[in-house]
Every structure is written in structure tokens, then in C-alpha cells.
Image (spheres, rainbow, N blue to C red):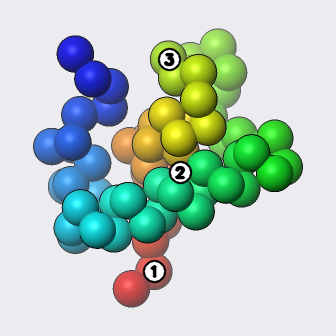
Amino acid sequence: MIYPSIDKLLTIVDSKYTLVTVASARSRQITETGHVQINENESRAVTPLGKALEEISENLIHVKY
């Protein structure tokens, strides 16, 4: 099973396009800075993109429209 689920993520953002854009931008930030908002012990993801999706799922990333 994929974590976090797309259904949960789409309750937080308004569209798949927004989800891809926000996750991509945050993934690049994680790659450049190495700073992750979610606790490393609680994270199931290995890649920066997975960590970005987990941050969105936990409402640590707020999208401004």
C-alpha cells in the first residue's frame, strides 16, 4: 500500500496538479537544504519526494491559493 494515500492528500489540496506542484517544490527544498519538518523516526519515506508527501499529509505544509 502506498503511504500517504492519494485520497487523504486530495482532502488537503484542491487538485492533483496542485499536489504535484507543491510536492515537487518541497522535494527540491529538502534536497537543497536537508531540512525536514517531520521527525525522522516517524517517517516511512526514504526519498525527498516521499518526505514531502508525508509533510503535506501531516498538514505541515500549507498551500496558499
Tell me which label, 2 or 3, sits earlier in the chain. 3
Considering depth in this image, is 22 or 56 the residue closer to the camera?
A: 22
Residue count near mark 1 (Cα–Cα under 10 Å), binned few <14, some 14–19, many ≥20: few
> Is disc 1 placed on a helix, strand or loop?
loop
Q: Residues within 10 Å of mark 2 (few under 14, many from 20)?
A: few
Residue 28, compared with residue 3, is above or below; it is: below
Q: Give coordinates of residue 44: x percent, y percent.
A: 50, 17
Mark 2 against mark 3, which lies toward the viewer?
A: 3
| Mark 3 Cα shell of 10 Å, populated few (<14), some (14-19), many (≥20) | few
Q: Is residue 39 left or right of residue 50?
A: right
The image shows residue 63 at horizontal and vertical percentages of 44, 71
Residue behind mark 2: 60
Amino acid at dot 1: Lys
Up-down relation of residue 50 to residue 30 (above or below): above
The residue under label 1 is 64
Amino acid type, callout 3:
Arg
Q: Quadrant of the C terminus?
A: bottom left
Along the viewing direction, whichever of 2 and 61 lies nearer the viewer: 2
**Residue of label 3:** 44
Residue 43 image point, x, y percent: 55, 21
